[in-house]
């Protein structure tokens, strides 16, 4: 692992332990060149996912983009970082298991909405407002009417 501070090629692992309910390994590393310490996480990846965008482009799946979207939806809600990571891991694992190596972008949005609906209604509505591109208050009312009706 390359040192993020000085770029030295060979860092040393000082401590390893399971993180996020065993879904990843947390490693504390030290750089012998500059002496700085940093943390890395290793996660199991079942397959490389490619996202098919609405315009037909194919781009690599970006876990960080997914995590940012979930964090924005859950902002100021009672969720700590560890729980958010578990949510993101669950979404990613579901996509890896149910999809081939290619997944349409709209399917990712649907899985996120389904997950947030089960986790937090406010986050669900926040995400839906962006994903479904609400433009006016009546869009919110119509969406909330569907939620209350189900």
Image (spheres, rainbow, N blue to C red):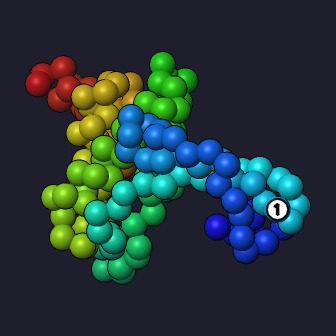
Depth check: 81 or 140 in front? 81
Residue 90 relative to residue 41: left or right: left
Could you tell me residue 34's position as x and y percent?
88, 61
Q: Quadrant of the N terminus?
A: bottom right
Residue that appears at 20% across and 26% down: 147
Q: What element does badge 1 sit on?
A: loop
What residue sits right under mark 1 in the picture? 32
| 33 up-or-down from 113: above or below | below
- Residues packed near mark 1 inside 10 Å, few (<14), some (14 to 19) or many (20 plus): some
Depth check: 128 or 95 in front? 95
Residue 76 relative to residue 150: left or right: right
| 139 up-or-down from 69: above or below | above
| 48 up-or-down from 40: above or below | below
Could you tell me residue 30's position as x and y percent?
75, 54
Could you tell me residue 29's position as x and y percent?
69, 53
Residue that appears at 48% across and 19% down: 78
Depth check: 71 or 63 in front? 63
Q: Answer with the quarter of the image where residue 102 lies.
A: bottom left
Residue 8 shows up from this direction: yes
């Amino acid at each position: 692992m390359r040192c993020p501070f000085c770029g030295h090629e060979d860092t040393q692992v000082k401590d390893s332990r399971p993180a996020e309910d065993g879904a990843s390994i947390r490693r504390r590393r030290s750089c012998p060149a500059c002496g700085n310490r940093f943390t890395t996480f290793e996660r199991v990846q079942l397959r490389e996912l490619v996202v098919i965008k609405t315009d037909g482009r194919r781009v690599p799946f970006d876990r960080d983009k997914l995590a940012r979207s979930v964090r924005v939806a859950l902002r100021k809600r009672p969720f700590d970082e560890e729980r958010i990571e578990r949510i993101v891991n669950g979404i990613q694992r579901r996509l890896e298991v149910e999809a081939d190596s290619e997944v349409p972008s709209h399917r990712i949005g649907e899985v996120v909405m389904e997950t947030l609906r089960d986790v937090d209604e406010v986050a669900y509505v926040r995400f839906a407002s962006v994903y479904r591109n609400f433009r006016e208050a009546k869009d919110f009312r119509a969406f909330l009417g569907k939620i209350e009706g189900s």
